[in-house]
Image: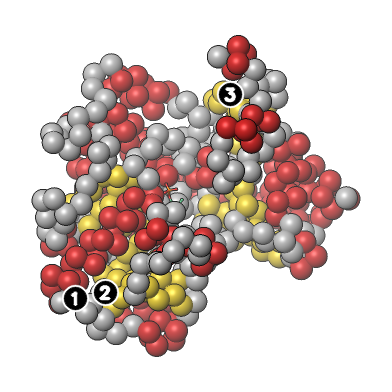
Amino acid sequence: MSVDMNLTRAQFDEVMVPNYAPAAVIPVRGEGSRVWDQQGNEFIDFAGGIAVNCLGHCHPALVGALKEQGEKLWHLSNVMTNEPALALATKLVNATFAERVYFANSGAEANEAALKLARRYALEQFGADKDQIIAFDKAFHGRTFFTVSVGGQAAYSDGFGPKPQSITHVPFNDIAALEAVISDKTCAIMLEPLQGEGGIIDADPAFLKAVRTLADKHNALVIFDEVQTGVGRTGDLYAYMSTDVVPDILTTAKALGGGFPIAAMLTTAKIAEHLKIGTHGSTYGGNPLACAVGNAVMDVVNTAEVLEGVKHREQLFRDGLNKINAKYHVFSEIRGKGLLLGAVLNEQYQGRSRDFLVASVAEGLMILMAGANVVRFTPSLVIPEADIAEGLARFERAVAKVVAA
Ligand SMILES: *Cc1c(COP(=O)(O)O)cnc(C)c1O
């Protein structure tokens, strides 16, 4: 098809809404952590579709699940339930604090459900005054109007008319600032246990504890947005599992489908009760096709082999990036956890993460930014060690070019 229609990047500007600025290359095929473009150029994938392709491209277990379900049943709507959804919900309940699952199609949708549930819960348990949502600067929770308003970058929510109300932002990891704004009117505190889009910023253990303690004191719910950190990304199935804090609501998406759109909101039975029949819903949420793939992802990822492998690969990345930095002096710090890593640009390279990204593409490597000052790596959780070595060699050449330019 691409040959017949002679599809090019230039056409993007003619037929697509201009809200993205995609790279010049058009990938057409992927296998594991390698991707090929229209001209057959090969790329090592350290981006993983923004922390989505947790098992690389076209993993046999996921392709198998998709093909098998694709020949059985794709869609029913929530007028009827289906076996893949029941199986996946059971796996998520067995593997986490949660007792109830709501399926959606994207991270933003799962977060939208979480926020609506928190508001409902507070309204029905404590009255209409209890509607304040506390969130954090630089947080990212998706692009629906509610979630983008809860997110911590006003630039993303400005310019669309009146915003949802009663949302308060405070600096991340700032216990005093949180204490200053929380009250009995607070219905929920929403946060990423490790901020992704905001620059790969880990939550301090003391801060997380304070979030839980203050929320409990004021009968507020704690919502963990694990859309990016979830499904093995940090070396635990969910990032909360290596903290002392258990959330009341957790959202998961991105890696949950390994590249097929699916998301879920997890919570307790007591809280879930407040999304009564008819209060919320989604046409595609929990469809058999997506859930079949989600089941395959969970079966592969939630194993000691894969989760331990993430920690081992993290070390390979850290060692490699530190070596590059010892030679070229571009980073002030390598931060993050598991395979959600950020190389923070030092004083001299402030604002230039895009230059590193562009130079990497030219060397046959796909990486990401997390803001203008952080180069982000979110590869497949099972990326072969040889691909890590080759990708880092390409990254070193890209860094050398940026430094020499
Ligand atoms: C990507 C992301 C979202 C939004 O997910 P979509 O699937 O794009 O709607 C929400 N929260 C976090 C933490 C994310 O990284």
Name the amino acid, label 2: Asp
- Please tell me whether mark 1 or mark 3 is closer to you in this view: 1
- The quadrant holding residue 363 is top right
Location of mark 1 (residue): 128
Can you tell me whether the CB of the residue at mark 2 lies under 8 Å from the nearest atom of ligand 1?
Answer: no
Name the amino acid, label 3: Val
Q: Is residue 315 visible?
A: no
Q: Position of residue 106 (x, y in %)?
A: 37, 45
Q: Point out the tag, 1 or 3, that comes first from the N-terminus.
A: 3
Location of mark 3 (residue): 28
Q: Residues within 10 Å of mark 2 (few under 14, many from 20)?
A: many
Taking depth in this image into account, of 156 and 137 the one nearest to the observer is 156
Local secondary structure at mark 1: loop
Distance between mark 2 and mark 1 Cα atoms: 7 Å
Q: Position of residue 188 (x, y in %)?
A: 29, 71
Q: Is residue 100 visible?
A: yes
Q: Point out the tag, 3 or 2, that comes first from the N-terminus.
A: 3
Taking depth in this image into account, of 341 and 69 the one nearest to the observer is 69
CB-based contact (under 8 Å), mark 2 and mark 1: yes
Q: Residues within 10 Å of mark 1 (few under 14, many from 20)?
A: few
Q: Which numbered disc covers residue 182?
A: none
Coloring applied to the structure: secondary structure
Taking the image as shown, residue 45 lies to the left or right of residue 121, namely: right
User: Above or below — where is 159 with respect to 175?
Assistant: above
Local secondary structure at mark 2: loop
- The quadrant holding residue 37 is top right
Query: Residue drawn at (63%, 52%), measured in percent from left and top?
Result: 369
Q: Position of residue 151 (x, y in %)?
A: 45, 64
Q: Quadrant of the N terminus?
A: top right
Location of mark 2 (residue): 131
